[in-house]
Amino acid sequence: MDTIGADIIIQILREEGVDVIFGYPGANTLPLHDRLTSSQIRHYLMRHEQAAAHAADGYARATGKVGVCLATSGPGATNLVTGIATAYMDSTPMVALTAQVSTSLLGQDAFQETDIIGITMPITKHSYQVHDVNDVAQTLRQAFELAKTGRPGPVLVDLPRDILAAKCEQAEEKSESALKKNGNAVEDPEQLEKIAKALNQSERPILIIGGGVKLSNAFHLIRELIAKAKIPFVTTMMGVGSVDSANGYNLGLIGTHGNELANKMVHQCDFMLAVGTRFSDRSTAQIEEFAPLAKIAQIDIDPTSIGKSIKINIPYVGDIHDTLTALLPLIDEKEKSEWLQRIDMERDVIEQKLDDSGCGQAGNFIRLVQEAMPRETTVTADVGLNQIWTIRTWKARGPRSLITSGGMGTMGFSLPASIGVKVGAPERAVVSISGDGGFFMNIQELATIGYYNLPIKIIVINNGHLGMIRQIQHHFYNGRFNTTDLGRNVDFVAVARGFGIPGCRVNVEEDPRAGIEAMANSEGPFLLEAVVDPENYVYPIIPPGCSNIEMMYERLD
Amino acid sequence: MFRKVREQEQTISILVNNQPGVLSRVGGVFGRHGYNIKSLCVAETTNPEVSRITLTSESDPDFTEKIKKQLEKLVDVIAVSDLSGQAYIQRELMLIGVTVKEGMHSELLRAIEMFGCKIVTMTPDYFILEITGLQDETAAVLKYFQSFGVEEINRTGSIVVQRNRPQGKI
């Protein structure tokens, strides 16, 4: 058999350590799909291209490796878009391969032709269209290097069918670096000393942990920093799970749906060390009133993330792993401070007030689920109330154990992402949590889970509504509910059975433990539908336009 | 992040890979940040693999700094320099088509001589003039000729080179 462009792709994928692709074929991908079957790369056939992108994303988040998805030209490529944007917002290393019409047809509105390069320009780190089969190897190597270096993110490679099928020679061995341009990090010891000095001298320091800690694998370093400086920490949505939730210095999630303790203490701190976070609006709420007393130091690999939305007193551009390694020796070993005692007092007051972390029966249900599952369980949360319930209630143990779409807030992420997680980390138990709204958005992936018999525990928390939007209508639109009622007419257990997946229904107001046990003890995939009241909201929340301490504890009317 | 305040004119010079699609990536960064490009010129450098994009825009310097960082992230961007406030030579070339009305012929010729314009082509009732100068100068000349009746203009936009010998090669 002659060597063709598709073989070069497989050669480079293997060279990059890829053993799994999530994809969907079409006429233009066939030269590649044809050769994939005889390769060592496993191809998971999803039921929608969007799900292929989310699965590659989930795989990358669970393993730290680059996730790869593959779709055909035209609608296949455009279906990837939401998944690529989701990966871009949360800085997931991903390579999206799209087939394209043959080069001779480009620009002619050929069947299933679309300008996917143009469409994905703002949601990729970079994109390539290959016009010569001899460029395939170099382009793909560049794509992988770009996806995982600096601030990681998705890179798209568009592959015309004639290039995939063109005869060529095997690619030569990889040379040093495929990229001309690499990173922007420059060591700056003076600036590091400034950070250390500010932290050492501060009386009320707080560490804010963002997603960057996961991306640079700096888990043990951040734990060391916390232990040495005795610094309390808060996390952003993307930072959750970087340090075990049970860590005594954990104040919780900050932001508009954050924990009261976290938001209160951030407001009082005199020094903030921000690590791998871009201060998104969901973390800061009203930006002018965020951490008003604090001097802020920020460490990030991406210079555009520093000082984008907030004024930074001590900026530092660098990889978090490298920077923390250099910073740690400069940090003083601290004693338990007055600040920590004050935090403990606040914690006691809040815990008496909100005994279920503001998540109601739904929160209790998630707690019971975690208790029933093995210690080594990874959970994927969807978007909406179910996300906040999960983030606030699930005790993250071990890095990469809690996965959700933070920046993009993509409903329908949880189910396909859990496929990527299970494939990437088969030794771990996997729970996928969704609301009924988000579950509908990629419900077809039940077929994929059933087909491959992936033992994923699928939880649909069903309140018959788009709960988070309903809560906003409740509080800020005078209870004028419209377009948020999804009805109760769908029997999710019957739906699952139709896909060959067993399941059962529980009501969280009653005792849901029998259903949870049935799920935890099941061998293969299992769907648990948990019925909750549509007014089981999340409290406290921050009303729009307010600061992080202007918390709302209940409905005002 | 759409800014309302656009105070000063900023001149940015960008070295990019001379490849299809690069201009739209650069333009996309400006558009997405709500930043209008006032003039734009793209041409190959002495290295045919590299092009120089010169553009001017109005904004505050802080914002230009943010845009500069965003541009530097693009794979096809080799270097970005913000020339505002630096020593550089700037020129613009403009072509103007002017109608010659009855009795205005000699006055028009005087103005052409005074401003140092070059007549590119002429018919008894229509001149095409070429003017090179600083952007302010070309603008002033245009304003003057508008009293005669300008039918058409086209201008290159600002092109710049730094005054001192550049360090290193492209």
Image: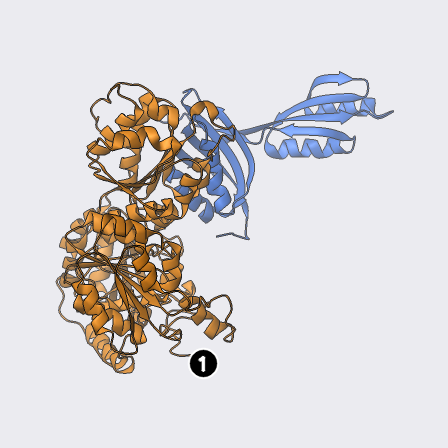
Where does label 1 land, which residue?
Answer: A556
| Residue A43 visible at all | yes
The correct choice, above or below, for B57 with respect to A352 in the image is: above
Q: Residues within 10 Å of mark 1 (few under 14, many from 20)?
A: few
**Chain A, colour shown:** orange
On screen, B35 above or below A508? above
Color used for chain B?
blue
* Camera-side residue of B103 and A378: A378
Please say whether residue A247 is visible from this viewpoint.
Answer: no
Task: Give the chain letter at badge 1.
Answer: A
- On the image, the x and y values in percent for residue A490 come to 39, 64
Amino acid under disc 1: Leu
Q: Considering the numbered disc 1 on the image, is that residue within a helix, a strand or a loop? A: loop
Residue A404, given in percent of the width and then of the height, sits at 30, 57
Query: Closest to the observer: B103 or A308?
Result: A308
Q: Residue at x 73, y 33 (%)?
A: B144
Question: Where residue A33 sits: x, y (%)?
Answer: 30, 33
